[in-house]
Image (tube, helix red, strand yellow):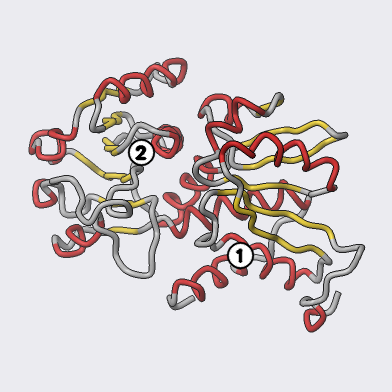
Amino acid sequence: MPRETFDTISGSTSFTAILGDPVEHSLSPAMHNAAYAELGLDRRYLAFRVAPENLRTALRAIPALGIRGINLTVPHKIAAARIIPHLSREAGLLGAVNCVVSRGGRLFGDNTDARGLERDLRRIGGALAEQRVIVIGAGGAAASAVLAAIRVRAVEITIVNRTASRGHALKRRFSELLRTIAIDARDLDALQDRDLLRDAACVINATSMGLTTRDFAPLDYAATPRDCFFYDLLYAPKLTAFLSPAARARRPYSDGAGMLVAQGELAFRLFNGVAPPPGVMRRALNLKLGRDS
């Protein structure tokens, strides 16, 4: 399909989409549609605001409508894992689903978040093998961060959360993978523990702090090594409340835009059976964020 006719939709156009509440802020349509245009595919990626009480109904409609694939964002990822009968091993381990496809009328759920973060951490080039990683949070995003840290061969992972018991629950979820990895869980006071921070190779924010609040929890950035990498799963045109102090402390940092691209590329292949053209989704996201490609 010529790129100049991409704005037309016909009865032969097929669809993928993202479901969330809210969803108006999502940049996934820009990324996926840029890849469709580049490949000349008669497909579109849409965004639907779906209230939590309507999620089950929306998911059941996927086979009937012939939708090729669905992404899920907040607040639906954990709920979908309880609704969808067939889960990938990774979605089951994380207890969350961010991709849904229909195969022969049956729904299958997967999760590309941990693989997306792993890809971005490796792209950035942080040397995390045999190192300590601190993960802030204990929800679904934190679970993805812990799994990514395991896969980049971190040997010590500290889960820091407002409620330490939730961190311990997250630790137990990964018990089968912990033969060569030490994981502990602590409350937010750990972010000012200089003995902990001085050995950190990477600190990952997997919470919404700074998005739903003006400030981030007190963290002693100066106590970390000068090459300690600060990674925020949140992304925005400007530095987040978690990353601004890291920049002032002259520590390397990145937001979650790269993870969004990487998990989106994985989802695109799952939905369409073909990889997106290299760099297209990243350029589309950067354009939306006002960044250089």
- Which residue type carries mark 2? Ala
Residue 238's mark?
none
Q: CA distance from mark 2 to mark 1?
A: 31 Å
> In the image, 222: left or right of 101?
left
Taking 179 as reference, is 288 above or below it? below
Report which residue position mark 1 lands on: 31
> Percent from the top left, x then y, of residue 186?
21, 26
Q: Nearer the viewer, mark 2 or mark 1?
A: 1
Look at mark 2 in the image and give the residue it sits on: 129
Earlier residue among tags 2 and 1: 1
Residue 243 in the image: x percent, y percent?
Answer: 25, 58
When asked about the image quadrant of residue 171, the answer is top left
Residue at image location 28% in from the left, 20% down from the top:
165
Q: Residue at x 50, y 62 (%)?
A: 25
Q: Secondary structure at mark 1?
A: helix
Residue nearer the viewer, 61 or 16: 61
Can you give x and y, in whole percent of width and height, for residue 251 in the image? 20, 58
Snapshot quadrant of residue 72: top right
Q: Is residue 70 left or right of residue 5?
A: left
Task: Please indicate whether residue 220 sits to the left or right of residue 256 in the image.
Answer: left
**Residue flagged by tag 1: what amino acid is it?**
Met
CA neighbours of label 2 inside 10 A, class few (<14), some (14 to 19), many (20+) = some
